[in-house]
Image: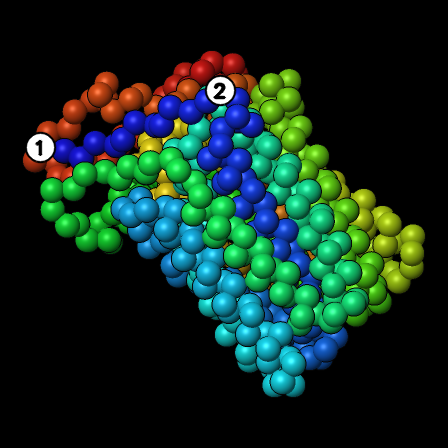
Amino acid sequence: MTACPDSSTAPKSLWRHRDFRRYLTGQTASVAGSSISSMAIPVLAVLHLDATPGQVAWLAFWGQLPPALLALHAGALADRHSKRRQMITGDLVSATALATVPVAAALEELTLAQLMVVAVVHGAAGVLHDAAAISLLPTLVDRSLIQRGNSRIGGLFAIAATGGSSLGAALTALLGPARALLGDVGSYLLSAWCTARIQARETTPARTTQRRLRTEIAEGLRYVRDDHRLSVLTWVNATTSLALAVLNTLWALYLLRVLEMSATTFGVVLGIGALGAAAGALSAPAIARRFGPGPMMFGALALTPLTQVPLLLASPALGWEIVIGGALFLQLACAGAAGTTQRSIRQIITEDCMQARMQAVSTWLTSGARPLGALLAGGLGTWAGVRPALIAGACLLVVPLVVLARSPLRALRQMPAPPPSPDTAEQRPAAAGPAVPAPGPAPAAEGVMDGGMP
């Protein structure tokens, strides 16, 4: 029988935790750099390469395809090998891919085809990095600190995204969108350096025989399927991702071309939204304690479709730009609060040796929905127009609300308890094959969801 390793013992103060600080510094730098790319690449495609709605959709599709294809494999690899080594590899590949864009632009050889190739390579490297990075946190800090850690990570990431968007707008205005990407290249190099300095010893499950990767992938799929809490939260993520993919694919084109927003204003609006994400993430633990994590997530999902209304009614005007910024602030505040909470729940209830695969299943479904959303947005945008496509995306945001509403998780009043340690877990018969940690019971079997600890 293969046993999961125990969680590492961590200091009770996150800020005294040296490895957590290094982890947070590296990932924050990467988030800030990614915000520069999120600002610069749409401007580069729409305004400098004159991309059509269909081409914008294809650019988004190719960038979002690698996670859908590789997430399960990346998660299994992260549970099998060193998470830090996988993170560093992803950072270095991303930096190399992005560096080719300003080089090609300087040589006046940059094309949309190259941007799409870079999007594929960058997306694949990001899958490797993220599968390891998300699952590394529960091995660095005590389970009792996970929600607090995710809250601070979410808040700091959002602040970094704000700074990155503002920096991206400034670099785009001063240097042009292609050379602005050098800021993201530097952020990946810093992330790799910080990750290399993490000193916590990683443990991986002992294996008496070499097992096929697909066997471990199947274990992760069954693990999420058999735990009602994990499956519901995963489907909430996936359906939300589909709706946001439709909206985000055409969002930049809509603001820059239809609403005639300048590149600088576009960056400022993104920065305002990132502040909302920070506010939501930092306030999530207090709101969850006051109302319960279930009602808080339900309320956030209910508000999200309403935040799209100003975008759909807007016309080119300064007043509408301010309203859109405010709506984006509220939307990302809801996303930050709900995202921090659901991620913490999933990490708390999952065994250490299943963390990466559990995260990978969510990434796989979430990322798989994005290319479909991008193609749907491109088709609707070409056939019916950009605004009708955005209306369709706003309507799809109701689906995750319905998924959560039909689950007992909507009434969850306290954060769940962690799973039992391996030495107290029920032993499985040897003939049953490779052991997989048993998922937690479904809420229906837990009895009380209005305040009892799962």
Query: Mark 2, residues whose alpha carbon is within 10 Å: few (<14), some, or many (≥20)?
Result: few
Residue 349 lies left or right of residue 48; in this view the side is: left
* Mark in the foreground, 2 or 1: 2
- State which quarter of the image contains the C terminus: top left
Residue 65 lies left or right of residue 287; in this view the side is: left
Residue 367 to residue 173: above or below: above
> Residue at point 73% right, 42% down?
275
Name the mark on residue 206.
none
Q: Amino acid at mark 2?
A: Lys
Q: Which residue is mark 2?
A: 12
Residue 306 lies left or right of residue 133; in this view the side is: right
Q: Quadrant of residue 226?
A: top left
Q: Amino acid at mark 1?
A: Ala
Mark closer to the chain start, 2 or 1 = 2
Contact between labelled residues 1 and 2, with CB atoms less than 8 Å apart: no
Question: Tag 1's secondary structure?
Answer: helix
Q: Residue furthest left?
A: 431
Residue 445 lies left or right of residue 97; in this view the side is: left
Where does the image place residue 272, in percent across and percent down from the top left? Answer: 77, 46
Question: Tag 2's secondary structure?
Answer: loop
